[in-house]
Amino acid sequence: MLYFLQKNDSNLLRTLMTNHALSGAQVILDCLKREGVDTIFGYPGGSAIPLFDALLDSNIKMVLSRHEQGATHMADGYARATGKVGVVLVTSGPGATNTFTGIYTALMDSSPIVVLAAQTTTPNLGKDAFQECDTSGMTFAAVKHSFLVKNPNDLPRIVKEAFHIARSGRPGPVLIDLPKDVTAGNCTASFSDEIDLPGYKIPTYADPAAVEKAAALLKKATKPLLLVGHGAIISNASRQVKELAEKLNAPVVETLLGLGAFPETHPLSLGMLGMHGTAYAHKAVLECDLIMSIGSRWDDRIVGKIEEFCKGATIIHVDIDPAEEGKILQPDAFLCGDAKLVLEQLLPLVSRLDTDDWVKTCQTYKKRYPLTYPKQGGLRMQHIISTVYELTKGKAIVTTDVGQHQMWVAQFFKADYPRQFISSGGAGTMGFGFPSAIGAAIGISSELKWPICCFAGDGGFQMTEFELSTAAIHKLPIKIFVMDNKYLGMVRQWQDMFYGKRYSSVSMEGNPDFVKLAEAYDIKAFRIKRSADAERVIQKALDYNEGPVLIHCECEEEDNVFPMIPAGAPLTAMMTEPPKGQLEKPTGST
Amino acid sequence: MATFDRNTSAHCLSLLVANRPGVLVRIALVFSRRGYNLDSLVVSPTLNPDFSRMNIVAHGNPEILVQIIKQLEKLVDVIQAKDHTGSNTVEKELALIKVRCKPEQRTEILQLCDHFKAVTIDMTDTSMIIQITGNTDKIDAMKHLLDKFEVVEYIRTGKVIMLRGEDIT
Ligand SMILES: Cc1ncc(C[n+]2csc(CCOP(=O)(O)OP(=O)(O)O)c2C)c(N)n1
Ligand SMILES: [Mg+2]
């Protein structure tokens, strides 16, 4: 009986044992359950032992990663796939610093995670104690917010606030710095639903005057274009985006992280905009007379040269973050609020525009400048991705790492569903793809029979490949496509195009045999070398249902991604095919 | 810190913040990341013990300042951030100026003090400490006139501001 209670309701247990005060660690876990947490990703260590000990008596699932960066990306992938807050638990010092890349990655893409970082004891703070690290100090610039807990009785309030901040408004990572004497000490404070954050504002509906202004601007537009970003997915606004596009009869382009917010197979979709976006998306942006961004922040990968972007066009910007107003572009109307709520405000005020010609023009562009790739030569990443897309009929969760393969997945896997496409956008973190697939696989309900397809470059996969153990232990239905071009392909492409083909530190000579690597972890593995084998082998990998499977794709080595707009260049500088001769070095960053 | 551009203007900000650990660091990071120089900073208790008031004078490009204010307001522990440059406020600073002087120079210095409504708060055979309050220009002027004596030490508080009338800053 007692065992049953421990497993299922530590609160009830507490009421039965009222003479026993709870430890800080127990209270934290109770708080997590109140926040709906079912899974924690993490790695233990000395300062974290009280928490890991308490976990044994809780029914929260603990996923032990092989590196804290992996755990953090897993929590991030979990959050992106489910919309719930991902939770990380690590020890102090190096455990905490190893999460840094993951925290920053989550910040850049507004992903809600809570990182519980253990710490030395409070009397030891500032004394260079063993594995002491000023974790909150080091992460100030990479978190949405953080807390250093000094008193166990603050725990219920702080955990509550941490989750509230992580998931609300523009979501983001929140770190809780947890000294060991706080988690091991007694907490007598009761749970409360009160939140004491007088400076924290969460925009909901936009100012009605701004909405009316936007409606009036839309009414005058003859060539309107919707630009849909991650914010639309975060706010679950896909239905409203579709309604708006169809009601106005306006074409839609998406950012990398917006993929899936609007079905790419929809006739009004023009696919992805950006450095490696579709030619037809760029044509439309160059010609539109109104662009309305819904939950995108005019990233430099989207706008290229700011002064030239949508010159003369009316700009409407919907964003939940007031600090985005005018950060990059000065909008004619700024609608500050939650994308879904704002679109619900706007929808009744708009009606069908006279855009038949405009839509026809865009669709002509789509036919005239399709995404293609050479069919001759060796195995192409594009071919692998297209085959996966066809064989799964587009019904798969897709995660990518960073590089050429990432851009090709964005181009050739036509995402129709929100939260289907998971990728590190703002940070471009190599090593993200595989652990985020693990997090997604653990997060999504097993009733969704979709496979989780992870596409990782040979470079990036090696940054977190050791999480193969984690995937194997949990028998996760992940199809790991290692897209091996024996190069840090994206960097090689730049050196090829802009630096006279002077290849510097981009060869991945020394790559392992990825099939053997997988087998060493007792993971099923296949190899594809020829295009002709792709369909058969991929089908086999998709059919395999006893856990993860790795597909080592030995691809064409020096293929380049097109279309391409050099960083910092205007959209007119788009190249749809390899240029002849040497190009100027790009002015924009990376 | 970024290069100091003399053409950029000085701005006077008032922030209301929650008394939570780390709030000052978070605020400083917002400025430093965008290349803004903080000229002065005053942190003061308010009537509500949960909050503090900060007055910041900063130099930089006015367009970037608009972004800085939004980023400050975005911080969880910042309740309000406002640029009061040019609004109807009273502004005061205080400076202590230590002058090395012979007894025969005192009269002239005391006349200056009289003119600027400054007071001497310490005096020895060879030195005086002068306390002056007022706006930036007045203190600059006084300091300038004292420079012909031997100023050996000098410290100024940051600027404190308050809106005139019944409006709350
Ligand atoms: C952690 C990290 N380090 C470096 C980079 C810079 N970078 C961007 S793409 C890239 C090459 C990626 O190579 P690979 O994983 O093999 O993918 P490919 O481009 O070949 O598809 C590099 C090094 C990065 N984005 N992240
Ligand atoms: Mg590669």
Image (cartoon, helix red, strand yellow):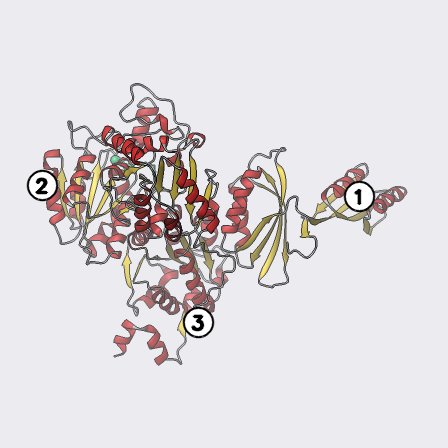
Picture quadrant of ligand 2: top left
Q: In the rendered image, which residue does mark 1 sit on? A: B99
Q: In the rendered image, which residue does mark 3 sit on? A: A187
SS at badge 2? helix
Q: In the rendered image, which residue does mark 2 sit on? A: A536
Say yes or no: labels 1 and 3 on the same chain: no
Q: Is residue B89 left or right of residue A564?
A: right
Residue type at mark 3? Cys
Crowding around mark 2 (Cα neighbors within 10 Å: few <14, some 14 to 19, many 20+) is few
Find out whether the residues at labels 2 and 3 contact each other: C-beta distance under 8 Å.
no
Q: Is residue A49 left or right of residue A439?
A: right
Find out whether the residues at labels 1 and 3 contact each other: C-beta distance under 8 Å.
no
Q: Is residue A245 left or right of residue A387?
A: right
Kindly identify which chain the residue marked by label 1 belongs to. B
Q: Position of residue A555 (x, y in %)?
A: 19, 33
Vertical side of A350 occupied by A164: above or below: below
Residue type at mark 2? Arg
Q: Quadrant of the N terminus of chain A?
A: bottom left
Kindly identify which chain the residue marked by label 3 belongs to. A
Which mark is drawn over residue A183? none
Q: Quadrant of the C terminus of chain A?
A: top left
SS at badge 3? strand
Q: CA distance from mark 2 to mark 3?
A: 59 Å
Q: Position of residue A397 (x, y in %)?
A: 23, 48
Residue type at mark 1? Val
Crowding around mark 1 (Cα neighbors within 10 Å: few <14, some 14 to 19, many 20+) is many
